[in-house]
Amino acid sequence: MGRVSDLDFEARSSVLPGKVVAIVLNWNLPRETFACIESLLSSDYPDLQVIVVDNGSTDGSPDLIRTRFPGIEVLALPENRGYAAGNNVGIVRALSLGAEWVLIVNNDAIVAADTISNLVVETRSRAGIAMPRIDAWPSGGLWRAGARVSGLYPLPRSIREGELAVGKPISIDYAIGCVLLIHRTVLERIGLFDEGYFMYYEDLDFSARARTAGIPIIVVPSARAWHKIGTSLKANSPRRTYLQTRYRTRWCRAQKPSFRTLVWWIALMVGALRSVVGSAFHASWLEVAATVRGLHDGMTAPNGESRPEA
């Protein structure tokens, strides 16, 4: 887990407005990255810089992106370091460029022209982390708007369409890393993404650390984004199943003993059992193996180790 410094959150938060640096992580998907960058460059926010971090692509992506967008900085990594580590490279660069906010954007997402402005306006007075409403592309309809813990139910519940109808920002407990605006003081206070998560659950961990530090997190319904679901890894991909299972298990291991942690473990095991039974019923033996291996590696791999074997 990276850490920048320990500057006072409240004091630094008053220095607004300022520069936004958007970080787009690419891995062998230049066409999706083109569309993402084009949506960012159409933003009405006046002080925006876009950085692309290429996560060890083997298809010539860095040169393709530089040719298409000659004014954009491309940081080409020699290998695929995963979501957390790849974005951390971009975050460190963004802070060195004087970013007041860092905007994490999946390369399979696009944003509306006023999304960044709406997120910045709302974080100026009430939050350190903000996400937009994210709809599915191209079908439309709400995909994610964060989650929160409420009532006696110990697990986070996704924000639903009806809750967004009020139009005002809503406090949440967990933000989605697909499109995420982070004030620099948050990074200075709690550090970067935990690189022990290669892919999945790093945003859950980041939100949990922010909550522990008392940093507000909100979803802004007036800020809109769209996500092309399953672009990086198909929904029925054994690799996706493996990664989700492994890092869900790692998340459970990292929690302090409590009733809520026990429920997390129960949910993990029930979900894994359902996956194994369902996959076996359809003779999807690669999916069965992915689930079992994900549980094994999540339980046995050192918490600081992130690189999956497959």
Image: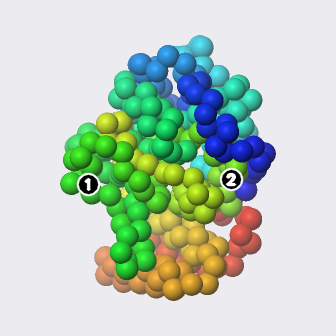
Q: Amino acid at mark 2?
A: Ile
Q: Residues within 10 Å of mark 2 (few under 14, many from 20)?
A: many
Can you give x and y, in whole percent of width and height, for residue 298 in the image?
Answer: 62, 74
Q: Amino acid at mark 1?
A: Glu
Earlier sequence position, callout 1 versus callout 2: 1
Please identify the quarter of the rendering in which residue 279 is found: bottom left
- Proximity of marks 1 and 2: CB atoms separated by less than 8 Å: no
Can you give x and y, in whole percent of width and height, for residue 78 in the image?
Answer: 73, 39
Can you give x and y, in whole percent of width and height, for residue 196 in the image?
Answer: 68, 61
Say above or below: 132 vs 95: below
Q: Residues within 10 Å of mark 1 (few under 14, many from 20)?
A: few
Q: How many marks?
A: 2
Q: Nearer the viewer, residue 202 or 97?
A: 97
Say above or below: 232 vs 30: below
Q: Residue at x 37, y 26 (%)?
A: 114
Say above or below: 16 vs 140: above
Can you give x and y, in whole percent of width and height, for residue 93 in the image?
Answer: 71, 32
Q: Residue at x 36, y 66 (%)?
A: 157
Provide the residue designation for mark 2: 190
Query: Viewed as shown, does residue 55 lie left or right of 147?
Result: right
Helix or strand or loop: what does disc 1 sit on?
Answer: helix
Q: Residue at x 51, y 52 (%)?
A: 216
Q: Nearer the viewer, residue 248 or 211?
A: 211
Q: Nearer the viewer, residue 138 or 14?
A: 14
How much space separates mark 1 and mark 2, taking CA atoms?
29 Å
Provide the residue designation for mark 1: 163
